[in-house]
Amino acid sequence: MGIVLYALDGCPFCEKVHDALDANDVEYETEWVEALHSKRNEVKKVSGQRGVPVLIDEDHGVTMAESANILQYVEQTLAR
């Protein structure tokens, strides 16, 4: 699968991104992360920081954080 979303359960910014991906029929996989920033090593490895949400689009070679940026990317690039 080409789209991976790193998210935290209960994070309102992550939920907005999930909703946008679902509303636009984007197929994606969710990687759930730990609540403690210090335990988010996988997120840091792929994005250089520990915050979520983080979207990885392997097909387009894109890695991005910040929900507003991700929502814009979903609408402009991934929406069907």
Image: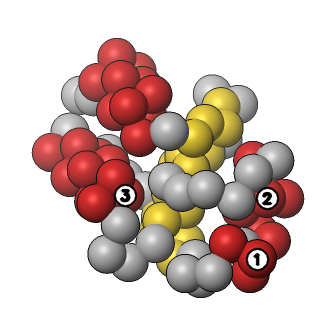
Disc 1 on helix, strand or loop?
helix
| Spot occupied by residue 16 in the image (x, y as percentages of width and height) | 25, 50
The correct choice, above or below, for 5 with respect to 31 in the image is: above
Label 3 vs label 2: CA separation?
17 Å
Disc 2 on helix, strand or loop?
helix
Foreground mark, 3 or 1, reads 1
| Spot occupied by residue 58 in the image (x, y as percentages of width and height) | 66, 41
Closer to the N terminus: mark 2 or mark 1? 1
Question: Which residue is disc 2 drawn over?
Answer: 44
Name the residue at 57% across, 41% down.
Answer: 65
The image quarter containing residue 68 is top left
CB within 8 Å, label 2 to label 1: no
User: In terms of depth relative to the viewer, which is nearer, 12 or 7?
Assistant: 12
Question: Which residue is disc 3 drawn over?
Answer: 14
Judged left or right of residue 49, residue 35 is left
Which numbered dot is residue 38?
1
User: In terms of depth relative to the viewer, which is nearer, 70 or 35?
Assistant: 35
Residue type at mark 1: give it. Answer: Ser
| Residue extending farthest left | 23
Residue type at mark 3: give it. Answer: Cys
Closer to the N terminus: mark 3 or mark 1? 3
| Spot occupied by residue 6 in the image (x, y as percentages of width and height) | 55, 62
Judged left or right of residue 53, residue 51 is right
Judged left or right of residue 49, residue 11 is left
